[in-house]
Image (cartoon, helix red, strand yellow):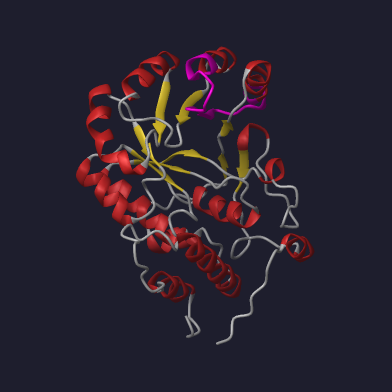
Amino acid sequence: LKAKPGSWQEAIEQIESFDFPALQDDDRAMRQNAVRCALELAWLDAWGQYFQQPLSTVTQHLAPELFEPRERVQYSVAITSATGLKLAFQSMTRRWFGFRQCKVKVGIAGQRDADRLRIIRRWMPRTELRVDANEAWSVAEIPARWQELAPYDITWVEQPVRHEAIAALAKVRSALSMKVMLDESLCSKIDAEHCLQEGWGDLFNLRLSKCGGYLRTLRLAQFAARHRFGCQLGCQVGETAVLSAAGRHFACSVKGLLALEGSFDRWLVREPLSKKDITFGRGGYAPALQRPGLGLELNTDAVERVTHRKEVLVA
């Protein structure tokens, strides 16, 4: 990364070819993904501004077969651990706000998933619902769990079991005709290849920092398209505007994404880090970011206030 790129294409090629030294006990090639994502976004933002290119054009350069620019996109919403009247209220407000899709967290200790889905479906009768078990189920209990949830027209279940049990899940899911989305089990190309070879699931949850940055996530989207896996764009809990902006560029340029998560900024973070609010609006709709790079202007005072530690790198 020392050589100054002569073009936007060269800047993209340089950062894609960069990698950290391999770590021991990292057979899935995933343990450095978050830091790689941070470095990559900083590089692409800087050179995108220099060459006057928005981050979304990376898709056009690297994956032209997936490039489908859009002026706006619609994000989905989530319901986490609410119960009772609070659950009913959240369901009603999400419907009134105009969301088309909703993810529901299930497998929460002390809660009956079927009871919660019954309330949600009552107030959101036409909303597409999917569930996320966050590795909470065992393989043995999946048939009973799925039987309980099936009446509520669930589109798919996300990461029902721990990654260590994902191979055993393959036999169960085929018997139930249950669509499975991989999240914790989909962090790298190695994971994607295992999924293809061993039948782990049907869909990928692509999260930029989890998957190693914009470029590697884009490569996973290409892999999915070649092998007919569906994809959603996921997000990190409490992510700031920097990662939300990168997700927006991905969402507005990659075709075929089944659901979009992210851009919750002002609903989740107390200290916005960008000068312009990029949170989605009514119905989850949000416009494409057109300015070069990430398209953000950081609030440096806010960044300073939330900084816990600084390190100076010496070449």
User: Residue 213, position in %: x, y?
Assistant: 47, 60
Residue 109 shown in magenta: yes
Q: Which residue is painted at 56% across and 50% down in the image?
A: 248
Q: Which residue is painted at 73% across and 53% down in the image?
A: 272
Compared with residue 137, is residue 207 higher up or lower down, i.e. above or below?
below
Q: Which residue is painted at 49% across and 25% down in the image?
A: 129
Compared with residue 97, is residue 310 higher up or lower down, i.e. above or below?
below
Task: Say which of 18 and 221 sits in front.
Answer: 18
Q: Say whether residue 83 is left or right of residue 200.
A: right
Residue 232 shown in magenta: no
User: Residue 95, position in %: x, y?
Assistant: 62, 22
* Residue 90 lies in quadrant: top right
- Number of marks present in the image shown: 0
Magenta residues span 94-116
Compared with residue 241, is residue 53 higher up or lower down, i.e. above or below?
below
Task: Say which of 125 and 71 sits in front.
Answer: 125
Compared with residue 5, is residue 13 higher up or lower down, i.e. above or below?
above
Q: Say whether residue 71 is left or right of residue 36.
A: right
Q: Is residue 187 visible?
A: yes
Task: Say which of 289 and 276 sits in front.
Answer: 276
Q: Which residue is painted at 30% across and 39% down in the image?
A: 166
User: Residue 194, position in %: x, y?
Assistant: 25, 49
Q: Is residue 65 visible?
A: no
User: Residue 208, position in %: x, y?
Assistant: 48, 54
Q: Say whether residue 54 is left or right of residue 62.
A: right
* Residue 198 lies in quadrant: top left
* Position of the C terminus by quadrant: bottom right
